[in-house]
Amino acid sequence: MSQDFQRLSRREIAIRVAADIPDGSYANLGIGAPTEVADCLPEGVTIILHTENGLLGMGPKPPPGEEDVDLMNAGKQYVTALPGASYFHHADSFAMMRGGHLDYCVLGAYQVSVKGDLANWHTGAKDAIPAVGGAMDLAIGAKSVFVMMDLLTKKGVCKLVERCTSPLTGVACVRRVYTDHATFDITPAGVVAHDLAPGLTHEALETLCGLKLLRKS
Amino acid sequence: MNKICPSLEEAVSDVPDGASIMIGGFGDAGVPFEMIDALVAQGAKELTIISNNAGTAQEGIAKLIHLGRVRKIVCSFPRQADSKAFDERYLSGELTLDLVPQGNLAERIRAAGAGIGAFFTPTAYGTLLAEGKETREINGRHYVLEYPISADYAFIKAFKGDALGNLVYRKTARNFGPVMATAAKCTIAQVTEVVEVGALDPETVVTPGIFVKRVVQVGPAHADGPAQH
């Protein structure tokens, strides 16, 4: 099956996510690929970044030689604190999520279901070392949960599914899924596909997903 | 009142076999490495460790695990790029893991310190980590009943402390320290600097001394301040 369309790069996906986070928001960008969203936030907007290990007002990575072991993000990478930043302990940090104070979080995923169920902490493999970190707290904590992922696995299996087969991180918690093929809104009426990759048709996307997808009205 | 302990050796000397110990830190930030080394030398075994991570390489909690001193670990994220000690003992069945979502871990510790009997939290509802737990629908949202986590000891790292046990922390090394300090029968803080009583501004004290039993000055050693390259 030849594909006459151009998949979005990770950077292009990050730009889409960043454009949808409004000025004045508090946001958590998870670990791994979603952290790239921070580099794509538009000039002139103030978005305060939260990292669950106890910092609001997280800034970019420090210049070489200025790393501080006491100043890192949830991915255990060195970061900086911007003017106006604050530090707090873990119970306060998770109260910011669980208590509904955090506006957005962006997470990676193994699978997302059409109902917005999220699977991103455990592949389900029997000999895997389980580790959950803050994923389950973030999944149910932010007011809007965005997922950023490739639509297909390396083997070509669609990760947007009717029902998750990997262990769940959260139930009906995802609002929007940004992928290299399209953006998907999880709505009560069904999954709305929009902003398809250049050259990709709605019908071809439905075939790839094996799902009935709605068009944006 | 003087909570200053002259050495880490003395501070951890009474930890018995079978003790439960909370250990602060997230990644390397805030981990009281030197106090863990003192516990390794002291020799206590059959320990239950409550901490966010399970250590990496051969340091900190990984050293305790590698030496077979740990029976059970309660944590959110044991898997690391180099968590060989944990992986081996876990896969061989010598080490029991109680995996707790990070926010639930923090809140369960906080609850213990605050005298809360249990609480309902939305985190983990409908997942493997809530299996077998009591749930309840409150105002249309689903919650899971979680119980407090307390311990015999808390080993934490702070930036400055005084003889009354008042503590301030440094940047994201604060993490679990303040909640763990409240939830153990005996909280021991290793600090970079001991200051005179009165030198800490009461407005900025993060952990009030009532939660702390022992303070040991360790100095800016292992993981503190600028990264060592």
Image (cartoon, rainbow, N blue to C red):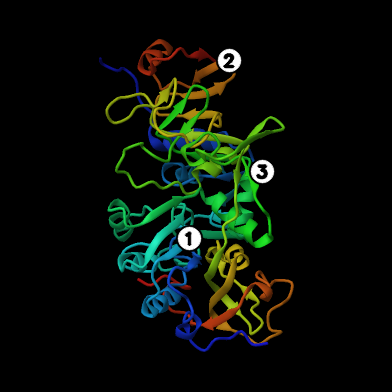
- Dot 1: within a 10 Å radius of its alpha carbon, few (fewer than 14), some, or many (20 or more) residues? many
Residues at marks 1 and 2 touching, judged by CB atoms closer than 8 Å: no
Distance between the alpha carbons at the discs numbered 2 and 3: 30 Å
Instruction: Name the residue carrying label 2.
Output: A189
A101 w.r.t. A200: above or below = below
Count neighbours of disc 3 (C-alpha within 10 A) and say few if under 14, some if 14 to 19, many if 20 or more.
Answer: few
Identify the amino acid type marked 1.
Ser
Image coordinates of residue B218 in percent, x first then y, are 48, 82
Percent position (x, y) of residue A85?
A: 62, 59
Mark in the foreground, 2 or 3: 2
Instruction: Determine whether, in the image, residue B169 is placed left or right of residue A108.
Output: right
Q: Amino acid at mark 2?
A: Ala
Lateral position of residue A215 relative to residue B122, left or right:
left
User: In this picture, is B135 found above or below A193?
Assistant: below
- Residue B202, image x, y percentages: 73, 75
Q: Amino acid at mark 3?
A: Gly
Residue labelled with disc 3: A24
Image point 35% across, 71% down: which residue?
Answer: B229
> Which residue occupies the foreground of this view, A199 or A216?
A216
Quickly name the residue at label 1: B51
What is the secondary structure assignment of the residue under circle 2? loop
Q: First in sequence: mark 2 or mark 3? A: 3
Q: What is the C-alpha distance between the residues marked 1 and 2?
A: 43 Å
Tell me the subunit letter for badge 2.
A
The chain containing the residue under callout 3 comes to A
Q: Write down the quadrant of residue B88 in the picture.
A: bottom left
Image point (67%, 76%), residue name: B209
